Amino acid sequence: MRDFLTALIECSLSMSALVLGLLALTPWLSKRYAAKWLYYVWLVVVIGLIVPFRFHPAVALIPMNAASSSIQQTTGETIRITTDPAVQTGIVRQGLPAIPWYQVTGCFWIAGAIAFIVYHGWKHHRFVGMVRRWGEGVDDPQILNLLCKIEHDMSITGQAELYVCSCVSSPMMIGFLHPVILLPRVDFSAGELSCVLRHELVHFQRRDLWYKSLVLLATAIHWFNPVVYLMAQTIASQCEISCDAEVVNGTDVNGRQQHSQTIL
């Protein structure tokens, strides 16, 4: 546990420096690289946070015991010298044994990670329950035909389910394997609905929900680090920006203007 906590803290500090540096460079990088590439650069940081162990080449080949050492004399006798202050003074402490710091810290870290996962799991379960209770399936043939056409244009096999739900304020998608697109009770025009459906299907096509799950896992592991929460917010924003850029890729000025008006 001590080695794991040491590696975890080392990883959290080093990756925090990388996150802050990447945040500082984002305005400069966004002018030179596409939003999609900046979005996936963050994935490397997320994986680095999930895997806390690092390779250290400078490791002693012969481990030394700091508590005691022995000196071999020419006569063959072995004199053992101890560096433990309690043994040198002849004092043996009585009473309850002291709990190592890493055991207390490890229990605190585990409790925080479990609480984080349980809280977000409960929120997701509660939201899915609200969708099942208040959601209504869309059966309008024109809307379903538009959805099928967009899926065909994007080479997506299988039709996503479409629900109108009063508990959502903006379009979103749930479902890792079987996508479900949730629409608010808003009267979208045909052009606006096309932009909305393309946007949500891009999320499914890029497996953004799996990406967000990795971000959630990294945040759960480093729940004590405020920089990780800042990273999660930045990734969520970069995800939407890159998705919008993917939707309007190859369109003319009118298409970009219509998509921008739909977002607003």
Image (cartoon, helix red, strand yellow):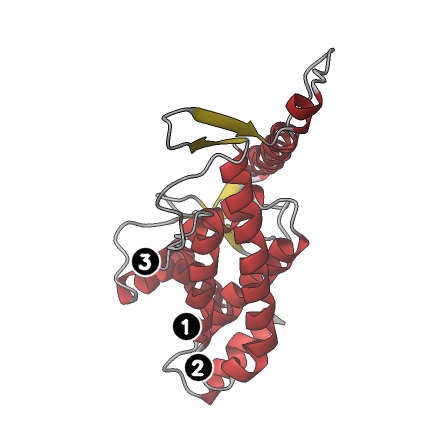
Q: Which residue is mark 3?
A: 148
Tell me if residue 252 comes above or below residue 161 in the rendering: below
Q: Position of residue 157 (x, y in %)?
A: 25, 53
Q: Which residue is mark 2?
A: 33
Between residue 58 and residue 147, name the one nearer to us. 58
Tell me if residue 124 comes above or below residue 230 in the rendering: above
Tell me if residue 48 comes above or below residue 40 in the rendering: above
- Indicate left or right for 90 with 232 as reference: right
Between residue 112 and residue 166, name the one nearer to us. 112
* Residue 172, label in figure: none
Q: Give SS at disc 2.
A: loop
| First-in-chain label (3 vs 1) | 1
* Residue 37, label in figure: 1
Q: Position of residue 250 (x, y in %)?
A: 36, 82
Visible in this render: residue 65?
A: yes
Q: What's the distance in space between the residues labelled 2 and 3, CA to CA?
A: 32 Å
Image point (46%, 72%), residue name: 38
CA neighbours of label 2 inside 10 A, class few (<14), some (14 to 19), many (20+) = few
Q: Position of residue 112 (x, y in %)?
A: 64, 35
Q: Give SS at disc 1.
A: helix
Q: Looking at the picture, which amino acid does disc 2 mark?
A: Tyr
Q: Looking at the picture, which amino acid does disc 1 mark?
A: Trp
Q: Looking at the picture, which amino acid does disc 3 mark?
A: Cys
CA neighbours of label 1 inside 10 A, class few (<14), some (14 to 19), many (20+) = few
Between residue 126 and residue 82, name the one nearer to us. 82
Residue sticking out furthest to the top: 95
- Indicate left or right for 117 with 43 as reference: right
Q: Are marks 2 and 1 in contact (CB under 8 Å)?
A: yes
Q: Position of residue 182 (x, y in %)?
A: 51, 50
CA neighbours of label 3 inside 10 A, class few (<14), some (14 to 19), many (20+) = some
Image point (48%, 26%), residue name: 79
Q: Are marks 3 and 1 in contact (CB under 8 Å)?
A: no
